Image (cartoon, rainbow, N blue to C red):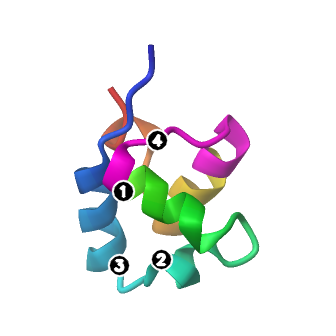
Amino acid sequence: MMKILGENFKRIRKSKGFTQADLAHGICTQATVSLVERRNQVPSTKILMQLCQRLEVSVDKIIV
């Protein structure tokens, strides 16, 4: 089972200077990013890959 590390995701997002809305733009909703960060909710693979690409981070940095 895949689990996302919401705190890592949030830390990386902030270090890159993105707001939740900036990161989500054109990929998903800001609410989706919030759920990933606060509730460790795993989005669809497509969304996860796009968010990681925008953050310039590999998926293995935020999932276990």
Task: Give x and y (percent) for residue 52.
Answer: 52, 55
Task: Identify the mark at residue 20; answer none if there is no mark.
Answer: 2
Q: Is residue 56 visible?
A: no
Residue at 30%, 77% in the rendered image:
14
Answer whether labels 3 and 2 touch (C-beta < 8 Å): no
* SS for dot 4: loop
Q: Residues within 10 Å of mark 2 (few under 14, many from 20)?
A: some
Whether the residues at callouts 1 and 2 have beta carbons within 8 Å, the answer is yes
Q: Residue at x 72, y 65 (%)?
A: 27
> Is 9 displayed left or right of 58 in the figure?
left
Instruction: Find disc 3 in the rendering and name its residue.
Output: 16
Q: Are marks 2 and 4 in contact (CB under 8 Å)?
A: no
Magenta stretch in the rendered image: 38-48
| Tag 1 secondary structure | helix
Q: Position of residue 5 (x, y in %)?
A: 30, 42
Q: Nearer the viewer, mark 4 or mark 3?
A: 4
In 3D space, how far apart are the residues under numbered discs 1 and 3 (Cα atoms)?
15 Å
Q: Amino acid at mark 2?
A: Gln
From the image, tell me which residue sits under label 1. Answer: 37
Establish if 44 lies above or below 29. above
On screen, residue 13 versus residue 23, left or right, reads: left
* Horizontal relation, residue 48 to residue 47: left or right: left
How far apart marks 2 and 4 lie (CA) works out to 15 Å
Is the residue 30 above or below the residue 64 in the image? Answer: below
Provide the residue designation for mark 4: 41
Q: Residue at x 25, y 53 (%)?
A: 8
First in sequence: mark 1 vs mark 3: 3
Which of label 1 and label 3 is nearer to you?
Answer: 1
* Amino acid type, callout 4: Gln
Quarter of the picture holding the N terminus: top left
